[in-house]
Amino acid sequence: MSGSSGQQAVFGPVPSRRLGLSLGVDLVYPKTCPLDCIYCELGRTTAHTAQRGLFRDADEVLAQVEKRLAEMETPPDFVTLAGSGEPTLHLDLGRIIAELKRISPCRVAVLTNGVLLADPQVRRDLALADVVIPSLDAVTQEIFECINRPAPGIIIEDVIAGLKAFAKGFGGRLWLEVLLAAGINDSPEHLAALATTARDIGPELVQLNTVIRPPAVAGVGALSLERLEEIAAGFGLPCTVTAPPRAAAAGDRGDLERQVCEMTRRRPCTISDVAAIAGVEPGRAERLLHELARQGRVRAENFGGETFYRGV
Ligand code: SF4
């Protein structure tokens, strides 16, 4: 598939909940994904496909990463393939990971929905990464369809088989992310089945998450922190609850306004997110967001009692 979003492929660095300081790399265009999760913070999937393609030009992406790294005083902890859709859709994934490791001192992480792991070539490509974080929110087709809304023909048993095959041969770190939405995939029966499947896959760690940003479908609800911790304690393998973003020191952050606009276009952010990402006082982040809202460059949305700002 070809095309262009006008967005840069490289974003950040951003303080990541799981990866420290992470330079993001977006291999596909907004929003290209085999899934259309009801909780997705990127909004509705517009290119709903499991068909791999070339999307962004690999050499251009690598040149952007090299340029951004050269601008930074200290390298980030990770270069992370994530962003506007599913990175494993990119046919040059293996070469891009190998080149990222050659041109940067950083470890490479990949956030994936795991759907394409049923394909042995995708497993070979991903095996070059240092950290792979696949998600798995459902173990029955009914709940999979409900929460992840897959493109036609994607069967959850195949996805799980792919995850197991990948875990078996992967020499890096594998952290399985499970997002729980209230009343959708958090019944005791489904949680027990999820825990059993997670144990069969055998990741180093399971990370429980919930809906913390405005979801694609209004009304999708979060679980409380207490409930997540209770579920984590009963999961039967190393399991953590993903904490809210924490402040981290970034290197050269470039122009603050540009960065905040870019960041909020990629995902809605609170004032504290912006303060953490930009390394500024919350008061300054608030003034900046209010000014950007006044200029019509971001818009405020309420979710779960918090105000999020989305770039327009
Ligand atoms: S949450 Fe991830 S897997 Fe789900 S639709 Fe959004 S980008 Fe795709």
Image (cartoon, grey):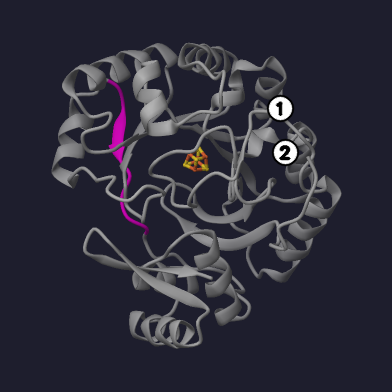
**Residue depicted at 39% across the width and 65% down the height:** 247
Which is more toward the observer, 267 or 164?
A: 267
Residue for badge 1? 125
Q: Position of residue 268 (x, y in %)?
A: 43, 62
- Say if 268 sits above or below 243 in the image: below
Q: Residue at x 65, y 70 (%)?
A: 73
Residue 292 sits inside the magenta stretch:
no
Q: Disc 2 residue type?
A: Ile
Residues drawn in magenta: 237-245
Q: Which residue is mark 2?
A: 97
Q: Position of residue 17 (x, y in %)?
A: 41, 51
Secondary structure of the residue carrying tag 1 is helix
Marks 2 and 1, how far apart at CA? 8 Å
Discs 2, 1 touching: Cβ within 8 Å: yes
Query: Does residue 153 sit above or below 137 in this rendering?
Result: above
Please rate how many residues cluster around mark 1, counting C-alpha atoms within 10 Å: few if below 14, some from 14 to 19, many from 20: some
Nearest to the observer: residue 42 or residue 212: 42
As helix, strand or loop, the secondary structure at mark 2 comes to helix
If you read the primary sequence from the N terminus, does the residue marked by circle 2 or circle 1 appear first? Answer: 2
Residue drawn at point x = 28 percent, y = 38 percent? 181
**Kind of residue sitting beneath label 1:** Asp
**Magenta stretch secondary structure, dominant:** loop
How many numbered badges does the structure rendering display? 2
**Picture coordinates of residue 161 (x, y %)?**
51, 11
The N terminus lies in quadrant? top right
Is 300 positioned to the left or the right of 255 in the image?
Answer: left
